[in-house]
Image: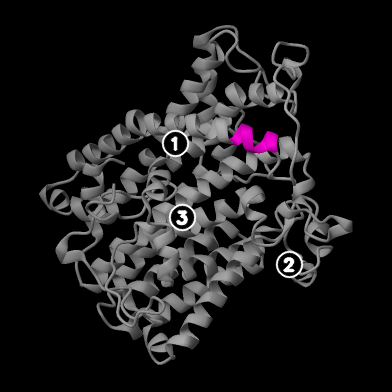
Amino acid sequence: MGEEDGRRLSPRPHERDDAHSNLNEPSPLNERSSTGYLDGLRGLAAVIVFIHHWTSDFTEGWHEFGFGQEGHHHFASLPFVNILWHGGNPAVVIFFVLSGYVLSLGHLKKLRQQKSTQWSLLSAVLRRPVRLYAPCVAVTLLYAFLLHVPGLILPVEELPLQDNLFAEIWVALTRSAEYLNPFQEHENNLWWFPYNMVMWTIPVELKGSMLIFVILGLYSLIAPGSRRGRALIPTALLFVAAAISLQLALKWSMADFVFGFVLAVNDVWKLDARLLQTTSPANRSFALHTIFFAGWYLLAMPHRPSHIEYATKTPGYMTLGKLIPKAYDESIYYRYWESWGALLFVYGVLRLEWIQRCFSGKTMRFLGKVSFALYLSHLVFQKTVGHRLMALVGGKVVSPLVGTRWDYAWWIPDIGPMGLSTRFLVCVGIVLPPNLLLSKYLTAFIDEPIVKLAKKMTARLGDSKMNSLRGSIEGEPMLPIARRRRNSL
């Protein structure tokens, strides 16, 4: 969002909290209250999703093998670094944990200060579907329109072109209503939305958001105030429930949202402060870095849907692969360790100042600002510009381009290791900047107006009391978006 929205999203003076005091390494007292660095993390995750959907066209899936699996030793398959090319699925899990955290944080701070949250919760419940679904429908309708621009978007088998634009728009609307229905299962291994396959996460975001709002409502009945003990017991029970859900493969995505909520409670009530304060700086630093890199390692587990051997046959992950509960279908087995990894990884980010600084730069904040638009638009952009560019330089040639002027017209040699070869770097380097520019305009002309519309809707539906509380609930995250400092953008 723009600078004006950044100011509105900043916590007001009476809402500022020292939730990170004594928690970051290695400074003994850090009063930082902004979580704008989470925007940077979200932005980087969106770029990783972008790269994830590009890489297979250049590697034919070889990068998905674990390092050392069946004789494969590719740089792009190394633990930790492989997430740059094959991190789309871990990025989604991080999105869910961050959503649970950011959606909870402001309301929990109010509860700690013994302020009422009923109106802010009502407003959040009303606004959340608009904030999530309206941009998706808008981008879908834009794609439906572009499908009927001659020669622009390459035809795809799963989306037959309708006879005319009006029929296309009608089909797009009806399929959107059908697919975005939250009262059904959504997963990347289930049926895809033909206009945009990444949109499966949006109904999950809505369901997870509503779960968080229900939990917040129950917490408001407990009214723990500033007493840590009163917040500790229900939080521990929630964590155990989420762990059981994850262990039994009931709802891995909802467990991720609850993990985010638990992290928010931990920050607001400083549940881990005493433990960290009584630990020496060196030991605290070692422990926090171990947690951070352990989470990163779990997120980087080699995986391919329906092929659990990618984990069980990779040195360093064999035991972890065998420890995945049998309740998990092989199509989503990797979600188990990814969920635990995201919990540890995000906790590390919340505690390590040098990591926060990495995600707080101007570039990272920009990526966070446009991340939702980038997430929704990158596959559309790939079908218009990306496939043509790949064919042009000698990469994969999709069937509609075979024998056309795009077919190997500007062939360049493919030199370098997998994931860092010349064709891959040239294509990503050319396509990513205009896609980011498109995302910037989509944010300005679709996302931000929808944000304002959602605010006006709840303002008109509420009474004067709700209007007085609007400032504390501005900027509910989409994928998700964190609170920013006043001059963050």
* Residue 167 part of the magenta segment: no
Image coordinates for residue 397, horizontal then vertical, percent: 75, 23
* Residue 426 part of the magenta segment: yes
- Callout 2 secondary element: loop
Q: CA distance from mark 2 to mark 1?
A: 34 Å
Closer to the eye: label 2 or 1: 1
The region drawn magenta spans 422-428
Question: Which quarter of the image is occupied by the N terminus?
Answer: top left
User: Looking at the image, which is closer to me, 74 or 341?
Assistant: 74
User: Looking at the image, which is closer to me, 282 or 204?
Assistant: 282
- Characterize the magenta stretch by its predominant secondary structure: helix
Q: Which mark is residue 41?
A: 3
Q: Which mark is residue 324?
A: 2
- The mark total stands at 3
Say which residue label 1 marks: 373
- Tell me whether circle 3 and circle 2 mark residues in contact (CB < 8 Å): no
Please tell me which of labels 2 and 1 falls first in the chain: 2
Closer to the eye: label 1 or 3: 3
Query: Is residue 191 found left or right of 305 in the rendered image?
Result: left
Please tell me which of labels 3 and 2 falls first in the chain: 3
- Tell me whether circle 1 and circle 3 mark residues in contact (CB < 8 Å): no
